[in-house]
Each structure stands twice: as structure tokens, then as C-alpha cells.
Image (cartoon, grey):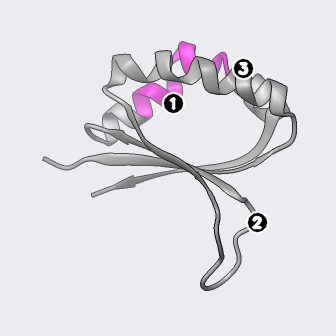
């Protein structure tokens, strides 16, 4: 079975709003089988350029679950908070 991942590259603009967003995301993941793999801060850029110092990786059962999660009313309701709280690039990947 293939998994799918959402990778978020993040630059926090408002730590308080970011904390609100982060606290609400887990409830949006559960119905889609999403689980946090890790969150981290960049130690070094070993090759190329990366403008975002923080990262999050979320695993889903498949790409259908990723797309369902992202389009869900529960997650969509958090986007305005996310956009105020951070600059973020969200990408999905399949394995």
C-alpha cells in the first residue's frame, strides 16, 4: 500500500496565531487517517536554497485522503488563520 505525505515549509509571522492554527489542525487530520510524522526547525541548508526555516510532515493512507483533508470544511476553515500566522508552502507527495 502506498502512503501519501503533506510537507509544509513554514516561516512563522505571528507566533500566537500560529499556536492557534497548530492546536486546531490535529482534529482535521483524524477523519482522513492523517498523522503527524514530525515537526522541525532547519539546522542547515546543505544544497540549494530554502527560505523557510520550519517544516512539518504529515502522513496519510493515500493521495485521496490528502485531497479530502485539504478540501474538507474543517481544514478550509483554518486557512485564514494559517495565512495570517505564517508563510507556508504545502506540497503533497506519494510513495
Residue ID at (76%, 66%)? 51
CB under 8 Å between discs 3 and 2: no
Q: Can you tell which quarter of the image residue 86 is in?
A: top right
Judging by the rendered image, the residue that carries numbered circle 2 is 51
**For the view shown, which residue lies furthest in the left direction?**
1
How many residues crowd around disc 1 within 10 Å: few (fewer than 14), some, or many (20 or more)? some
Question: Residue 3: x and y, percent?
Answer: 26, 47
Query: Which of the 4 image quarters holds residue 81?
Result: top right
Instruction: Look at the numbered disc 3 and give the secondary structure of its residue.
Output: helix
Identify which residue is drawn at 43% across, 34% down.
67
Instruction: Give the label, 3 or 2, closer to the camera.
Output: 3
Residue 16 versus residue 9 in the image, above or below: above
Q: Is residue 52 left or right of residue 57?
A: right
Q: Which residue is mark 3?
A: 20
Q: Which residues are magenta?
A: 67-78
The dot on residue 30 is: none
Q: Who is closer to the viewer here, 90 or 43?
A: 43
Q: Position of residue 70 (x, y in %)?
A: 51, 30
Q: Secondary structure at mark 1?
A: helix
Distance between the Cα atoms at labels 3 and 2? Answer: 23 Å
Residue underneath mark 1: 70
Nearer the N terminus, badge 1 or badge 3?
3
Relative vertical location of residue 21 with respect to residue 73 in this rendering, above or below: below
Task: Confirm whether residue 57 shows in the render.
Answer: no
Judge whether residue 11 is colored magenta. Answer: no
Disc 2 element:
loop
Report the Cα–Cα distance between label 1 and label 3. Answer: 18 Å
Q: Is residue 74 magenta?
A: yes
Q: Nearer the viewer, residue 65 or 20?
A: 20
The answer to whether 43 is drawn above or below residue 68 in the figure is below
Amino acid at each position: 500500500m502506498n502512503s501519501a505525505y503533506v510537507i509544509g515549509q513554514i516561516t512563522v509571522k505571528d507566533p500566537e496565531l500560529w499556536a492557534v492554527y497548530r492546536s486546531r489542525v490535529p482534529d482535521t487530520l483524524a477523519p482522513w487517517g492523517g498523522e503527524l510524522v514530525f515537526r522541525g526547525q532547519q539546522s542547515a541548508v546543505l544544497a540549494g536554497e530554502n527560505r523557510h526555516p520550519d517544516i512539518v510532515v504529515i502522513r496519510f493512507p493515500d493521495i485521496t485522503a490528502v485531497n479530502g483533508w485539504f478540501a474538507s470544511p474543517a481544514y478550509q476553515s483554518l486557512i485564514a488563520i494559517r495565512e495570517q500566522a505564517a508563510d507556508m508552502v504545502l506540497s503533497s507527495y506519494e510513495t
